[in-house]
Amino acid sequence: MRRIGLLAAVVAACLSVPALAEEPDRTVSGEIVGADNQSYKAIPFDVPEGVERITVRLTYDRQNKTVIDLGVFDPQRFRGWSGGTRDRFTLSESDASPGYLPGALPAGRWHVQFGVPNARPDSRSAYRLDIFFDRGEARNATAAIADPPVKAAPGWYRGDLHMHDAHSDGGCASQSGKRVPCPLYRTVEAAAGRGLDFIAVTDHNTVSHFGGLRELQPAFDRMLLIPGTEITTFHGHANIFGPARWVDFRVGTPGVPTIGAVEAAVQKAGAILSINHPSHPSGEICMGCGWTWPDTDWSKVSAIEVVNGFNAEGPLSGLGYWYARLNEGKRLAGIGGSDNHDATAGPDKAPIGRPTTVVHARELSQAGIVDGIRAGNVFIDVEGTRDRLLEVTASSDKATAAMGESLRAAGVVRVQARVQGVTAGTLRLIVRGEERERRELGSGEAEFALPRGTACGWISVNVGSSEGRLLLIGNPVYVTCK
Ligand SMILES: [Zn+2]
Ligand SMILES: [Zn+2]
């Protein structure tokens, strides 16, 4: 016992150990000595039932040129190898670090496999393995695709929340000009070219692209890659952002009796659900595209895709559908997504980033963006520019609320709007879905005053162009009058 304690102290003293997001489920400490040179060492650890992800982190004393190669075996077979390249790896049913094999994680005795290509004859190097298990709703930040956050600061972050690639029905031109399933990297590259801060890749009903995102993330270190899935049912499509596992979409089969069961599973997987293109007609051209589930549990829906591609206005806009749900008292963030199916397509198809959803988040990480959408301080940049900004607050007496927040009306409600990146146009004050007042944009800052009784329910601000096109769509401030 004392020996292990001493070793841990040596490791802590010699190495800069990154702060742990959570306590590891297993810690194994030991020493590599000169006699271990050019040998393999198997370090056993036991995996209990029900583990959905295993993440392993190795720290060791490298001062005397000791090198530890890293790999892992499950109770039956080889599961991956990263040599001296990595000091951590993760694997789950859906995805794994490059070099590792995703798949079932059987309970029993696993082995971290060390190879020691170099240990000097009289050297002693302490090592420590921290092993993390994700189970049920317990997830480790150490397993995030972007770890640590891409940016640690709070701010407005611009992204696209809906796109497809070869892992579902995304297609693009091959070398010889044939239309082929479009590789994921082209989607990610195109998004980076648009200067986005984040994207969610949302292939239909699958999680097979999560491993690819894990491979691409380090190379795209200015853009957060969020794993997503577009749940495609016979009565509507919905995106889920950041699920820990595959979610069964087969409503009407024994494991998934209702759409409510899908919604509950999304919540259990730590993801949020956003209803896609809700006003699209359903039929033979687009099967199950409009949202027509009668028994939707709205308490488990976080957002509505108000703008899908070019459809900010007109019959395919989700704006009317969203406003009707808000008028029913539901609290739902309005977001947008390009629904891009060809990252290399010309301007006749919505490119990645059109529209852009701009989210105020505490940091640029998966949890930061998902929590930011949930909180609702969000606006849609319909044309997907890089610089348009819409900030809205409402105040009454001494209280102030941002988009997505609640305000108690205690007298006049004042609505402040600040716009950047639009030189000419109009500010439109929306009260319970109806335009109440329209003003020239002017300097980009405006204040509207609403007598107490008139603001109850929710208010929002949109921005239109001089020609009348919608440019920016704000989220509601919820106003209570009781
Ligand atoms: Zn869809
Ligand atoms: Zn889609």
Image: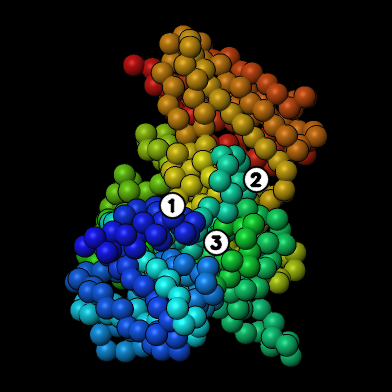
Residue 87, visible in the rendered structure: yes
Position of residue 325 relative to residue 32, above or below, is: above
Separation of marks 1 and 2 at Cα, in angstroms: 37 Å
Q: Amino acid at mark 3?
A: Leu
Position of residue 413 relative to residue 317, above or below, is: above
* Nearer to the camera, 106 or 61: 61
Residue 44 % position (x, y): 27, 78
Quadrant housing residue 108: bottom left
Q: Residues within 10 Å of mark 3 (few under 14, many from 20)?
A: many
Q: Amino acid at mark 2?
A: Asp
Position of residue 87 relative to residue 37, above or below, is: above
For mark 2, what is the residue? 381
Is label 1's Cβ within 8 Å of ligand 2? no
Counting residues from the N terminus, which is met first, the one under dot 1 or under dot 2?
1
Residue 225's tag is 3
Point out the residue furthest to the right here: 423
State the quadrant of the N terminus: bottom left
Position of residue 124 relative to residue 132, above or below, is: below
State the quadrant of the C terminus: top left
Q: Nearer the viewer, mark 3 or mark 1?
A: 1
The reply, left or right, for residue 299 in relation to residue 147 is left
Q: Amino acid at mark 1?
A: Ala
* Nearer to the camera, 280 or 427: 427
Residue 457 % position (x, y): 42, 26
Rendered residue at 24%/60% (across/down): 2
Counting residues from the N terminus, which is met first, the one under dot 3 or under dot 2?
3
Residue 107's tag is none
